[in-house]
Amino acid sequence: MTHAHDFLHALLSHARPVPAADIHVFAAERFGEAARFCTCSHQDLSLDELLPIMQAKGKLVLTEQGWQFNFAAMAGH
């Protein structure tokens, strides 16, 4: 199980938005095609389940350029 913070750090280290059409390839290359994710309060999430949770928490934003880390919502844990 991959923690959402690891996914967020991968986006952060990528240094540019990941186009929405490429986000599944991005995640598969880093965590495997069968990757499942967890957060501090959710378990066993697919990427499609994780993205809206992270977006609702303000940790990810979807712009015209793609998915990117929201620096304003950086958690300290």
Image (tube, helix red, strand yellow):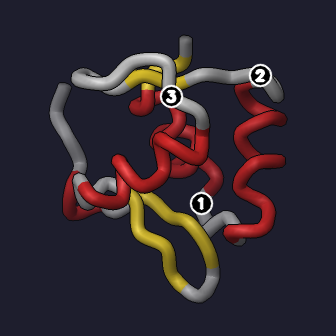
Residue kind at label 3, given as amino acid type = Leu
In this rendering, position of residue 48 left or right of residue 76:
right
In this rendering, position of residue 64 left or right of residue 60:
right
The quarter of the picture where the C terminus appears is top left
Q: Which mark is residue 45?
A: 3
Tell me which residue sits at (34%, 63%) in the image. 70
Q: Residue beneath label 1, please?
A: 15
Tell me which residue sits at (35%, 48%) in the image. 53
Residue 51, percent across and down? 48, 51
Q: Are marks 1 and 2 in contact (CB under 8 Å)?
A: no
Residue kind at label 2, given as amino acid type = Ala
In this rendering, position of residue 49 left or right of residue 31:
left
Quadrant hosting residue 35: top right
Neighbours of disc 2 within 10 Å: few (<14), some (14-19), many (20+): few
Q: Are marks 2 and 3 in contact (CB under 8 Å)?
A: no
Q: Earlier in the sequence, mark 1 or mark 2?
A: 1
Give whichever of 6, 55 is nearer the camera: 55
- The Cα atoms of the two marked residues, 1 and 2, are separated by 24 Å
- The Cα atoms of the two marked residues, 2 and 3, are separated by 11 Å
Residue 20, percent across and down? 68, 68
Between label 3 and label 1, give the one nearer the viewer.
Answer: 3
Tell me which residue sits at (31%, 54%) in the image. 59
Q: Which mark is residue 1?
A: none
Residue 9, percent across and down? 48, 39
Q: Which mark is residue 34?
A: 2
* Secondary-structure class at tag 1: loop
In this rendering, position of residue 54 left or right of residue 11:
left
Residue kind at label 1, given as amino acid type = Ala
Q: Are marks 3 and 1 in contact (CB under 8 Å)?
A: no
